[in-house]
Image: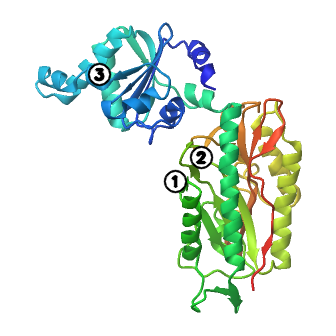
Amino acid sequence: MKSDIPQLMIDRNLDAVVVYGGTDVSSDLAYLTGGAHLGEGMYLHTRTGGPVLFSNALERENAQSTGYPVRLWSDFPFGRYLKEADNDMMAARLARWRDIFIEYGVSGRVGFYGMSDMGYAWRFLSALEQTMPDIKIVGEIPPNLFAQARQTKDAREIEMMRAAGVATTAVIANVFDFLSGHRAQQDTLIKPNGGPLTIGDVKAFIRLELARRNLEDVHEHIFSQGRDAGVPHNVGRSDMPLQLGQTIIFDIFPRDRTTGYFHDITRTIFLGYAPDELAEKWLDVKRVFDEVMASIRIGEPGAKYQMMTCELFEVMNYPTICSDPQTMVGYIHSLGHGVGLDIHEYPRLSTYGPPTPLQPGHVVTVEPGLYFPDEGWGVRIEDTIAFDETGAIVNLSDFPYEMVIPVK
């Protein structure tokens, strides 16, 4: 949480932190501003002086809405620095940042965060360190200070994420109604004009439903059928007609345009009917999902539930990533990930990364799946869950697990 930032700075022996960029590209800056938009902003926080937020004059009221002390870039006019540097852009930027750091007493170990071209960031920060010998630039490996703060959500954040879940599941319900409203002809769904209903048609409907609920499709949702469903992140081919009796993975992960928080949920469905053999595969995934959901609790590392998932699938004689890290069939990914202002955050339900114990405020997905593209199918079931202040599970994806969507 944001209130953890001062202690996290102490833990990392940082005298100051800088988060630079725009809120549209830097989720760390978006987290700090609480949804206030800044095209070019800088959050500067010193251990002795606290935080200050820099913005341009056009967005000064956005910056002021955050409650931080605000300074304008125009207080340090770039034109003057550029003139003094004889139009050398790099030298002018360095001089401007040097004066800001001097005014705010920035020295010692300084952590830098945000978004920038990697090559430019390396050149600029290397030159800044040479320009200001009193600072030592610190770069962290993930999870960095802000990833650590952000992975624990407060009650207000969880409520915003619950609202995103309610809106997202309303989209799914309308998509299912849209599908069942079409008739089938020779195992293909047909539009009123007699042409086949395609995945592209469904995706267009989904985009409209998202827009009606102030949700945005930042990363294209997945609506993949048959063989394509056998590769987890195949988004689905727009020209493919919808067929009865095939697995369809519908994985939707929109962002709330107002709050910036994501939701993530997956349902695997059949149109019209489920062949017996594929219905059994769906039930196998659902059994694993149910067992994990019944077992998951705070105090345990996420890796425990990844291993549990592998063991459950292996008992059913499916290949898994735990026994064969290079397998392309069976269970081939981690069980889940954190969700927040990014669709993938910490903590992770995985054997990779830090073994963070689950704790109140964590929001994670639970998404076991099986994938056999050469056999023409894939199944995944996913909910996003939160742990409230008591450690109890709050399911933010409150939506039925329907196997078959009836059609006319």
Q: Would you say 242 lies left or right of 87 here?
A: right
Callout 1 environment at 10 Å: few (<14), some (14 to 19), or many (20+)? few
Kindly identify which residue carries mark 2. 343
The disc placed on residue 32 is: none
What distance separates the C-alpha of mark 1 from that of mark 3? 35 Å
| Disc 1 and disc 2 in contact, CB within 8 angstroms | yes
Label 3 is placed on what type of residue?
Ala
Where's the N terminus, which quadrant?
top right
Q: Nearer the viewer, residue 109 or 1?
A: 1
Kindly identify which residue carries mark 3. 127
Kindly identify which residue carries mark 1. 218
Q: Secondary structure at mark 2?
A: loop
Which x, y percent locates residue 224?
Answer: 63, 69
Which x, y percent locates residue 336?
Answer: 71, 46
Q: Is residue 201 above or below residue 171?
A: below
Q: Nearer the viewer, residue 205 or 362?
A: 205
Q: Nearer the viewer, residue 196 or 212?
A: 212
